[in-house]
Amino acid sequence: MYLILNYLYFFYLQARHFKEQDIDEFRECFSLYARNGQIRTLDQLTVIMRSLGMSPTISELKKYFKEKGGKMSFPDFLDVMHKHSQVERIPDEILAAFKGHDPRGTGSIPARDLRHILLQWGERLSHKEVEQIFREANITPNGVVRYQDFCRIVCAPVPDYY
């Protein structure tokens, strides 16, 4: 009984941090990869968090895993997701990367430079994907990209049409 009350209290606390819809998504992903109800390997934690759109570093993952004693139940996982959501600031990281390509501080970069970055660096996108991003962000191929506006468009939550 004490364990059940503990879980309920924990879910109450997490509900203040996440929407019910988010918790349902986390639970679904967790149950797909943690088949016996617990995360027991660093690889499982990595896959689950990245599947949910987080980008933790290996050292962050190791720290979270160690803090939870080498295994995680779903409430432990929610705690980790909350901690990591406080640390990860993707829009700020994207803006910092853009500023690195804008030495004069104009607030914009040529569209051709953005195309090159998306096609050649990191997790490379296809030409079709880049065209779709440019179309959705109203970027002309020979124009300039105001990266603050671009970041706002790219980082906006995906509408839920259920």
Image (spheres, grey):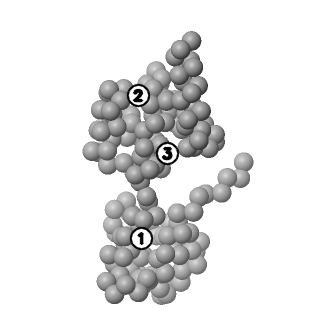
Question: Residue tagged by mark 2?
Answer: 72
Local crowd at mark 1 within 10 Å, few (<14), some, or many (≥20)? some
Image quarter of residue 71: top left
Whether residue 40 is visible here, answered yes or no, is no
What's under tag 2, amino acid-wise? Met
Residue annotated with mark 1: 95
| The furthest residue to the right | 162
Specify whether 103 is left or right of 109.
Answer: left
| Residue ID at (45%, 26%) | 73
Where is residue 142 drawn, in percent x and y?
Answer: 48, 87
> For numbered disc 1, what is the local secondary structure?
helix
Q: Pick whichever, 70 or 142, lies toward us.
A: 70
User: Which residue is painted at 41% across and 76% down in the image?
Assistant: 114
Q: Nearer the viewer, residue 127 or 104?
A: 104
Residue at coordinates 53% horizontally, 83% vertically from top-left?
A: 140
The label number, if any, that marks residue 52 in the structure image: 3
Tell me, yes or no, whether the two marked residues, 1 and 2, touch with CB atoms within 8 Å. Answer: no
Vertical order, 26 against 115 (above or below): above
Q: Is residue 12 visible?
A: yes
Image quarter where the N terminus lies is: top right
Question: Which amino acid, mark 1?
Answer: Leu
